[in-house]
Amino acid sequence: MTLGVIGSGFGRTGTMSLKLALEQLGLGPCYHMVEVFKTPAAPDWWFEAAQNPARADWGRIFSGYNSTVDWPNATYYKELAAAYPNAKVIHTEREAEAWFESTQATIFADRGEANPEAPFPRMLRKVIFELFDGRMHDKDHLISVYEAHNAEVRAAIPADRLLVYHVSDGWPPLCDFLGVPVPEGPTPKVNSREEFGAHIAEDVQKRMN
């Protein structure tokens, strides 16, 4: 099994909805941060990969998966695009202010002190927080990094290999890009702030110490 789709969009840009959409289209299983929770060794694998992304054992991390979206993989989209040259790249985006506000209410919300040597927070620090210099509540800085990443993806990935996608765009551009039929019904739209608080935040908290 090899990756056919690589998501380059940061968390809170509709990545969970895209995960479910890809799986509905037959391009799953799709890796997402929630998959890290399911494999105790995964945080250590990602931390190891971050030490030398060009030589990372991506096959071990993505064994059994056909696609990947969200963090941690979004940090290493260029390395993954090189490792899987036939994979298509989907870049999820949303308006920058809305993205920032969503991060503060969910993935970057304060959860107290974490054990810096525990596998999960160590991984988060290396593969996500360092992207923002650890300034996780500095609005102007986070938005600057976010917008720079969006521009970098467009510059790094050839246009015929890249789809810049907003979840609100629905099925047509996604299915056209992937060359699959448009299914009946709307695209999935999940992982709202309320859903994050109810289902994911508890898993994150458990792994911080």
Image: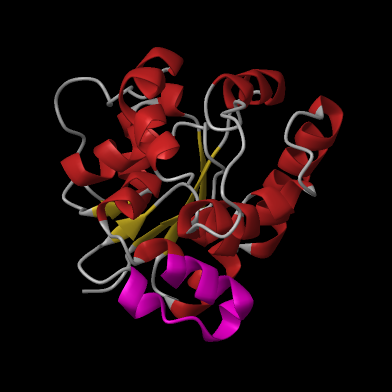
Q: Is residue 159 visible?
A: no
| Viewer-proximal residue among 70 and 121 | 121
**49 part of magenta stretch:** yes
Q: Residue 194, how many percent across, how many down?
A: 39, 13
Q: Report the residue that reaches farthest toward the bottom.
A: 55
Q: Residue at x 24, y 20 (%)?
A: 186
Q: Residue at x 20, y 45 (%)?
A: 23
The image quadrant of residue 98 is top right
| Viewer-proximal residue among 184 and 21 | 21
The image quadrant of residue 134 is top right
In the picture, measured across the screen, residue 116 lies left or right of residue 24, that is right
Q: Residue 171, how many percent across, how many down?
A: 31, 31
Q: Relative to residue 172, is residue 153 depicted above or below?
A: below
Q: Relative to residue 22, is residue 27 depicted above or below?
A: below
Magenta span of residues: 44-61
Which of the image's four quarters has the N terminus?
bottom left
| Viewer-proximal residue among 187 and 158 | 187
Q: Residue 142, how many percent across, how many down?
A: 77, 35
